[in-house]
Image (cartoon, rainbow, N blue to C red):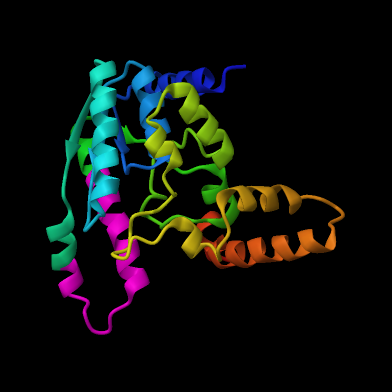
């Protein structure tokens, strides 16, 4: 089974079934968004890729732009825009300087991007296509609630990160994007995902996600899984349904 073919057919079938006229994808310069935008391009459905820097490191923005240029040169149905949200974010940031919560403001960047994606999607009767992988979406919950977690469909949410990297190579995606250290791009200091995940790499998290289902673990594996679960537990509120009071 060729997984990339199965996924882009799944996207196409969903769009045709629901009369979707356009696919909208945020492109960050990372491998997940590069893979998803390429899969969308393969459907033949009009695909809009948005690069949305907010005080972004230039090399990250450049990778996103280069990928969009590559896509638009290879696929007739792909268009792209760069919408710099820095001034919008800084206006918002100025309203919340005291007390300042850096994590809240980082999440607000993701939510501004989500709003931009939906603005474009609704304008053209389209949908927002998510770029989260299995480890992020269902393992450690490494995404912003109502930010990059706010999407209409999630084509690679059942793929481990290693599977995403492999698919990127099969799709001919720029090696610089494949080799780049994963980052959510939400921090001025340019910190990478591993910095925010207790020093664990995606390969380690993936291993722990699988080990967590095992009946018996070695002592060193218990330590790794405990570290994984400490990240997962603080993010379960994102993955679980919203609590609803039920009338007695």
Q: Is residue 243 visible?
A: no
Name, please, the residue furthest toward the right: 216
Q: Is residue 191 magenta?
A: no
The range drawn in magenta is: 92-117
State the image coordinates of residue 142 (x, y, percent, origin top left). Answer: 49, 56
Q: Quarter-wise, where is residue 79 in the image? A: top left
Residue 57 appears left or right of 35? left
| In the image, residue 241 above or below residue 164 | below
Q: Is residue 116 magenta?
A: yes
Along the line of sight, the residue nearer the viewer: 216 or 199: 199
Q: Quarter-wise, where is residue 247 in the image? A: bottom right
Q: Which residue shows up at 28% across the image and 64% down it?
A: 188
State the image coordinates of residue 221 (x, y, percent, origin top left). Answer: 77, 59
Q: Which residue shows up at 21% across the image and 58% down it?
A: 55
Q: Quarter-wise, where is residue 190 in the image? A: bottom left
State the image coordinates of residue 68 (x, y, percent, origin top left). Answer: 26, 31
Question: Which secondary structure type mostly characterizes the magenta part of the structure?
Answer: helix
Count of all numbered marks drawn on residues in the image: 0
Q: Is residue 35 visible?
A: yes
Q: Which residue shows up at 42% across the image and 57% down it?
A: 192
Residue 30 appears left or right of 225? left
Q: Quadrant of the C terminus?
A: bottom right
State the image coordinates of residue 125 (x, y, percent, origin top left). Answer: 24, 30
Q: Quadrant of the N terminus?
A: top right
């Amino acid at each position: 089974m060729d997984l990339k073919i199965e996924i882009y057919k799944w996207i196409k079938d969903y769009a045709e079934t629901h009369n979707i006229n356009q696919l909208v994808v945020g492109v960050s310069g990372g491998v997940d968004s590069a893979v998803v935008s390429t899969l969308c391009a393969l459907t033949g459905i009009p695909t809009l890729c948005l690069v949305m820097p907010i005080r972004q490191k230039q090399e990250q923005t450049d990778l996103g732009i280069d990928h969009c240029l590559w896509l638009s040169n290879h696929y007739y149905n792909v268009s792209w825009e760069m919408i710099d949200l820095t001034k919008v974010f800084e206006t918002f940031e100025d309203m919340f300087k005291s007390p300042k919560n850096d994590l809240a403001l980082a999440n607000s960047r993701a939510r501004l991007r989500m709003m931009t994606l939906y603005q474009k999607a609704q304008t053209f009767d389209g949908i927002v296509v998510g770029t989260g992988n299995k480890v992020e979406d269902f393992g450690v919950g490494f995404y912003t609630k109502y930010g990059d977690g706010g999407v209409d469909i999630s084509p690679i949410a059942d793929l481990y990160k290693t599977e995403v990297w492999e698919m990127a190579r099969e799709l001919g995606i720029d090696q610089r994007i494949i080799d780049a250290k994963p980052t959510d791009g939400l921090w001025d200091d340019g910190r990478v995902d591993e910095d925010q995940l207790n020093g664990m790499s995606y390969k380690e998290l993936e291993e722990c996600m699988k080990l967590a289902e095992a009946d018996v673990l070695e002592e060193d594996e218990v330590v790794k899984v405990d570290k994984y679960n400490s990240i997962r537990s603080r993010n379960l509120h994102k993955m679980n349904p919203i609590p609803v009071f039920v009338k007695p």
